[in-house]
Structures are given as structure tokens and as C-alpha cells.
Image: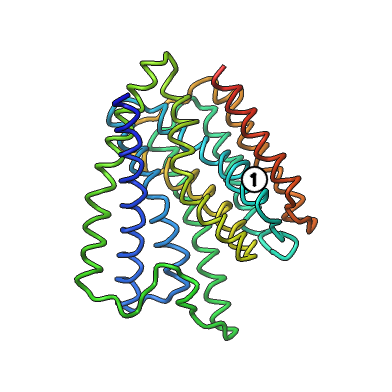
Amino acid sequence: MTPWLFSMLGLVILLLAGDALVRGAVNLSLRLGVPALIVSLTIVAFGTSAPELLIAISAIQDNAPGIALGNVVGSNTANILLVLGIPAMLKTLHTSECDSRKTYIFMIMASVAFIALAFYGTFTMGTGLILLALLGLVLFDMMRDARAHRRCGVPDQLEEIEEADPDMPYWRVVLYLLLGLIGLPLGAHLLVENASLIAQEYGVSDTVIGLTLVAVGTSLPELATTVMAALRRQADVALGNVIGSNMFNLLAIVGIATFFGDIPVDPEFLRFDLWVMLGSSLLLVPFVFFHVNMTRIWGIGLTALYAIYVIAILT
């Protein structure tokens, strides 16, 4: 029972430390005069992916690379089927009002490029650099769009960044940064080490643990954000959160993690899991391009598909 408790403790520390790091980084950047739009496109996006990144690095260093890759692929699948499915069951997501076509196309392109590189059998520093180069192109395009919006008279909206507090004192900013920087590696180490013990205890691979326990755990922040967005009728936030998170998972996390060691690709990923991830991504086509609302029926269907997926990989 102890590995389960320590895994949960590691997950809680990760989530709290990730939130602290984002709050500290956002408010420090705004204090230094960085525009809110730039902060939301870069610091918030990277900060919310920090738990997954630290898990990937820790897994590679602990000789459990299956957890690293399983977490990324599993999180992307969970983000679409579970993180959108559960809120849609609670309240219809009015996705017909959103325009996320461009970022969605970027996400599909990132998914296809990731799968193509996976067929080389191992993610090395070379393939990691390719992923980071693609991320750089996406960020450049996002920055260009942000500047265009500002030239058109769209002001920086601090209230759009939940973590922004213009009156936060410097000592609290520093405290948040320290809590994040100390808590993230501690939580990642606890979670990866004990998740590996659970895998050994139940006779399953690190990859399966990464695809299920670790992936769902690290998707909890996205789930919380999406539930609140659904209740507030902010479908653009819900959909954009998932699309952006998936793109960063593929390009940034695996790209950076390869600098700490090679990540071998389990053949099962090539036969099944990567295609489930891509298929799940393509399920968003009606909501992105054809102005279909994500109703409760859709929510039930997506959540049921995720349950079937988990049963399939566990059996």
C-alpha cells in the first residue's frame, strides 16, 4: 500500500508545486513589464506542463523511460476523451462558438510528426531538436498573431490570466518560485519511483503505468480548468486548453527530455497507443470545423471510449 500512498503524495506535490511556479513566474514577468499576451502564450503554457516535464526527466534518470513516453501519449489521449468528455457530461460545451482551427491544425501536424519520428525506434537528442524546432515555429506564429491583435487595438487583459495579481508583493513572488522549483523535482521523483514499484508489484510494464496512473494524474489540472470553463460557458477556454496542452506535451516535453537521455519507443506504442492518440485527436474535427456543440451525449461517448481504451491496455 505504501507505493500507492507515496505515488499520490508525489502527484499532489507536483500539482501544487506546478501551480506555485506558474503563479510566481507570471507575476514576476508582469512586474518586469512583459506583456500579458506574451505571458499567457509562453510562461503559463510551459508552467502548466512543468509536472509532465519533470516526470519525463525523472523517469529517464531512474531508468524508466516507458513512464516518460507513456505519460505524454496517455495524457494526450486522456485530455481529449476524459478532460473534454467529463465536463461535456456536466454541461454542454458550446464549441460551435469557438475558432480554434489554426491551433488544432498545428496540433494534428505535431501529432503526425511525433508518430513519424517514433518509427525510428528511439527519441534521441537529434529527434528532440526537431520537435523543439517545430515548437519554435508554432510559438513564433503565436507571437506574430499576438502582436497583430495588439496592433488592432486589443489590449493586454490581465484578468484573462487567472494567476495574475498586480498587487502581489515581491516576497510572495519569490516564495511561489521557490516552492515550485523545490516541489517539482521532489514530487516527480516520488511519483516515478513509486509508480515503478507499483508496476513491478502488479506485473505490468512502466509503459502501462505511464499511460494510465501517471497520465490521468497529470491531466487533473487540465480537467479542473475545463470543468470550470464548461460551467462558465467558456468553451473556447476548454477546447484551447486541451489543444494547447497536447501540442506542448508532444513538442516541448519529449523534446527537452531527450537532452537527459534517449527514450526508446515500445513496439506496442507503434501498434496501438500512438494511433489511439491520433484517432482521439481526429474526433475533434466536428467541433473545430463544423460548428457542432459538444453535448452530454458526446461527453458520455468520449468518456466511454477512454474507459474502453484503459481496459484494453490493462488486459
Q: Which of 196 and 154 is in front in this view?
A: 196
| Residue 294 located left or right of residue 216 | right
The residue depicted at 37 percent of the width and 22 percent of the height is: 198
The answer to whether residue 82 is seen in the rendering is yes
The answer to whether residue 134 is seen in the rendering is no
Residue 121 locus on image (x, y percent): 49, 24
Residue 238 locus on image (x, y percent): 59, 57
Q: Which of 36 and 115 is in front in this view?
A: 36
Residue pointed to by mark 1: 85
Q: Is residue 189 above or below residue 53?
A: above
Q: In this view, does 291 lie above or below 123?
A: below
As drawn, which residue projects farthest toward the bottom? 153
| Residue 55 located left or right of residue 281 | left
Which color scheme did the rendering employ for the protein?
A: rainbow
Using a 10 Å C-alpha cutoff, classify the residue at mark 1 as few (fewer than 14 neighbours), some (14 to 19) or many (20 or more). many
Q: What residue type is labelled 1?
A: Gly
Q: Which of 309 and 123 is in front in this view?
A: 309
Q: Is residue 174 above or below residue 113?
A: below
Residue 205 locus on image (x, y percent): 43, 19
| Residue 235 located left or right of residue 122 | right
The residue depicted at 67 percent of the width and 51 percent of the height is: 88
Work out which quarter of the rendered image holds the C terminus and state it.
top right
Residue 218 locus on image (x, y percent): 44, 43
Work out which quarter of the rendered image holds the N terminus and state it.
top left
